[in-house]
Amino acid sequence: MTVKHLSVDYNKVNERGTFSPGDILSGKVTVVTSKEIKVQCFLVKAKGKVKVTWSERVGQEIVVHCNKKKYFYFEHIILQDKNKGDDMPSTYEGKWGKVTYSLRTRLTQSIWLVHKTKIEFPFLTKAEFPFASKSDMIIIELKEQQYATRISFYGSQKVTMNVTSEKVGVKQGEAIGVSVEVLNESTRTVTPKFYLCEKQTFAAQSKRIVHTNDTLFATGDAVPAEISRTMTKVLSIPPQLAPTFFNCGMMKLEYRIKVTLDGVPLARDPEIKLPLVILLGSPKPHEQKPKRSIWFRKLPG
């Protein structure tokens, strides 16, 4: 083996180490040989792709669902198309699929002697709001308050929960205020809990599969029997959390804020979900100090 080493690497263009449409991807290919060699071909490739795959049992058989798509595949040419770039999602890896972008190099000495190597590079879309076909009205509504209510009856007892989030859209590393009002007309003490819900959806061969994950953000103060109480929690979005995206035909990533009530008798804990769009934040998000306010009153009767 006269080729002792073959590698490919790229130069970072920002502190994130990510690339976006219009950026120039440059780097170097290193070849180490033990002596002078002759080659048939020496090339560098750039490729971006998405792949989704999962399996399920149908009767006695295991059926595999798979789908994939190439966003670009170039030899010698690195992507610089600003117009088409934002149709591609950022680098992402989910439960049953991932979006990857890579550089590859191949050194062919003969039909029997081929050397290959590759390196993946993170791609970051420049779209501020990576939805495939949404109107500008949705972007405006990201700043609007969201409100939902739920009334749960348990025999002659009633528990009412009202939940308000200060806005729909929030950047990575930022915080969002969520208020919950509980009117507890039951004989039990109930406790609000705040969750961040992640929903990954994958599609292949006309089939869909969904993976969800709920993360406990915070626990509110207990609301005793026959008491009404309102509390506000400021929930900080982890800066490393992947932003919401819908601009990929094979997968999408959504988030919700979920508020539940622990302690409700004889039933599953009631819950309210509000939409949450996580947008791309700054590379070094600033920490925000949590705020909290509580008040309560005795219910009449």
Image: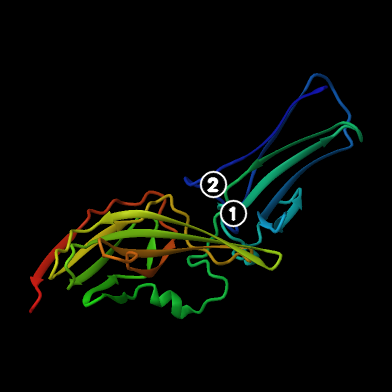
Percent of width and height locating residue 87: 62, 66
Task: Locate residue 184 relative to residue 133 in the image: left or right.
Answer: left
Mark 2 nearby-residue class (10 Å; few <14, some 14–19, many ≥20): some
First in sequence: mark 1 vs mark 2: 2
Q: How many numbered dots are placed on residues in this image? A: 2
Tell me the element at label 1: loop
Looking at the rendered image, the quarter that the C terminus falls into is: bottom left
Q: Position of residue 278 (x, y in %)?
A: 42, 62
Occupied quadrant, residue 197: bottom left
Q: Tag on residue 227?
A: none
Q: Is residue 300 visible?
A: yes
Pick the residue in front: 14 or 50. Answer: 50
Disc sitting over residue 23 in the figure: 1
- Image marks 1 and 2: residues in contact by CB distance under 8 Å: yes
In the image, farthest residue toward the right:
111
Vertical position of residue 164 compared to residue 45: above or below = below
Q: Which mark is residue 13?
A: 2
- The part of the image, by quadrant, that contains residue 277 is bottom left
Task: Give amino acid for label 2.
Answer: Val
Residue 156: x and y, percent? 21, 78
Q: Is residue 43 left or right of residue 57?
A: right
